[in-house]
Amino acid sequence: MLNEQMTRGIKQGNYEQYLRERIHRNANGVLPLMWASIGLEFEHAFGGERHTYVLERSWKDDGKRVKEVLNISQDSKPMEGLDSRQYEDFVQDLIPPALMQLLFFDSEKIQTLANTSLDVQRITLSRVIKSLLGLNLVDRLQTDLSVYRRRQQRDNHIDVAQKQIATLENALSQIDNEEKQLISRLATLDSQIDTVTAEIEIQESEVARAGGGFARDREMHKSSQLRLRAEMESVQQGIRDLCAGLLPFAITPMYTTAVKNQLLRESEYQYWLASKSLIDKRLEKIQSEVMSPGFWEGTGAEVLFSLQQSVGERVIQTLQRMVEPPEEMREVDLRHQVSESERGQLLGWIEESQNAVPAQIENLTTRLAQLKHELEEAEFALRLVPADDVLGPLVEALNSQHQNLGQLIQLRSQTQDDLRRLKSQADGLKRELHKAREDKATRQILADKIRRVLDVQVVLDDFSEELVGSRVSQLRDALMRNFNQLCRKEHLLSQVDIDPHDFSVTLIGLDGQLISQTTLSAGEKQIYALALLWALRQVSGHPLPMIIDAPLARLDSDHRRNLVEHYFPHASHQVILSSTDTEVDEDFYAALGDHVSRSYYLDYNQTQRSTQVREGYFEYFTGRGRG
């Protein structure tokens, strides 16, 4: 039921080849078998409840590789809470690999252990004890912790982080000092600005008392004087242009209206004359048409010549009356011999003189009066301005103070800019310092972890030493008890010492003298090896069955009887012996009779090349067990 990891110490070589050799070879078969399986059914208490487990490991050779499958059932059902990938872990939890060599062994292994050198025996004992106690995991953990600690120490330069923090703190301290100096300078500048501002207010009062208020506006008044005079000249020129133009007609609206009406009547009369000339030409043609005979054809009056003459004359007379001038046109006197376009221009001028020109002259005269008033005010203000020799020194002093104030304000602005720049630098350094402190805190955490790792390693060392010392104490008592129980009296031990550090074993006889293992006989060495395996199993704390193959080979009769009487019945709560009839003969089988629960005989058939399982101990002991 063991996998490759478990069988590595038992079967050397290729694991797949090992499995191939365990496939049955049937000499009478047509085709060779390509698969095999082995199963085991047992009871095991888990979680306070007893369950029946069935383990089956099967493997198949497809010609290229051997594929292996492990199936586990619990109470005839698939395992709950485990998938197939966890079955191997479940088996190893049931039977730890370190216990296999204590639970499953044969006479060859006993002989090998008995004949190994003391150094090899010590190393083997150390490995087995550490594996039994789980200290191999502790050693692996110690190694992993050491690797982790070295890696963290290599990358965790906490001194570099501390130097960076110190550098940033020094830079911040320097900036803080500079900020304090700038703040002090800013306070001084504010005080100076307040002083100069007060002096300016006093000087402005002096200038005001000396007419400075007017002096400040002198240039403005001069400029206004020039501007007003220029604008007045422009307005006056506009008035002159109107006087030279239509303004005279604007002051005689009655006459311009009469001229306008005359021009309109003349226009209508000339229009009538033009129309009459055109109509007269048409009347001659109409008269000729009416008086012709063809005009009357088809009217029924063509035979009445006198009627034609009468009607024609009346039509002509009617048309002539229509083109005669109206009553109001008969007395029109054409005074203005002008063209129609000239008449239109004259009417436009008359319209402008009656409507636009009066408004223009009114606006210009109003604006001229306003400008004249403003000019008088500006000239009056200029007359109030004091002389330059009186006001000059006061204004010069005032200008100097204003210049000084401007320089102070500029210095304050520059100082404020420097403060903002330092604050920005300080903010950046504070962010870097915060990151550096976080980095140091992280590195400090790593350093604390490293210290804790060292503490854990010390605790693990203490734990291993204490646990090994405790188990070694149990082991030496069990080894002495087992050896005395299995060996002859003349070699009984009074004490067994096992060094908890190098696991060397010292045997002390009843006389207090050291007993060297090299002085033991071959059988006594095997008894010693068996007693050691038994003691290791006893202190392991795992109540598992023991399986022993060829248990009595290479032992003399006395040692065999001691094993039959004192070892096999007590080696475990369940012991499986795989023995030949030459090892456990009829007498030994009878001695074991009260302790035997089941006996089976494995009968190999040479012809079929297969083994059959029968109840009983060989053919001549069948039925001797207690069933």
Image (cartoon, helix red, strand yellow):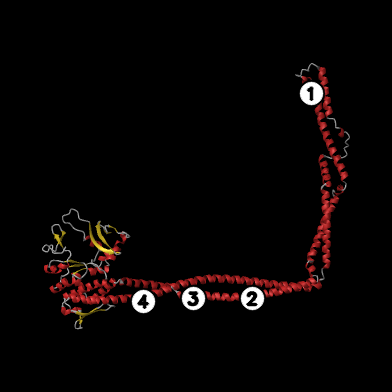
Q: What residue occupies the far front of the structure in this picture?
A: 48
Mark seen at residue 289: 1
Quadrant housing the C terminus: bottom left
Q: Earlier in the sequence, mark 4 or mark 3?
A: 3
Q: Earlier in the sequence, mark 3 or mark 2?
A: 3
Label 2 sits on residue:
185
Label 4 sits on residue:
458
Q: Earlier in the sequence, mark 2 or mark 4?
A: 2
SS assignment at label 1: helix
Distance from Cα at disc 3 to Cα at disc 1: 133 Å
Distance from Cα at disc 3 to Cα at disc 2: 33 Å
Residue 123, horizontal then vertical, whole percent: 26, 74
- Crowd band around label 3 with a 10 angstrom C-alpha radius: few (<14), some (14–19), many (20+): few
Amino acid bearing label 1: Glu
Distance from Cα at disc 1 to Cα at disc 2: 120 Å
Label 3 sits on residue:
163
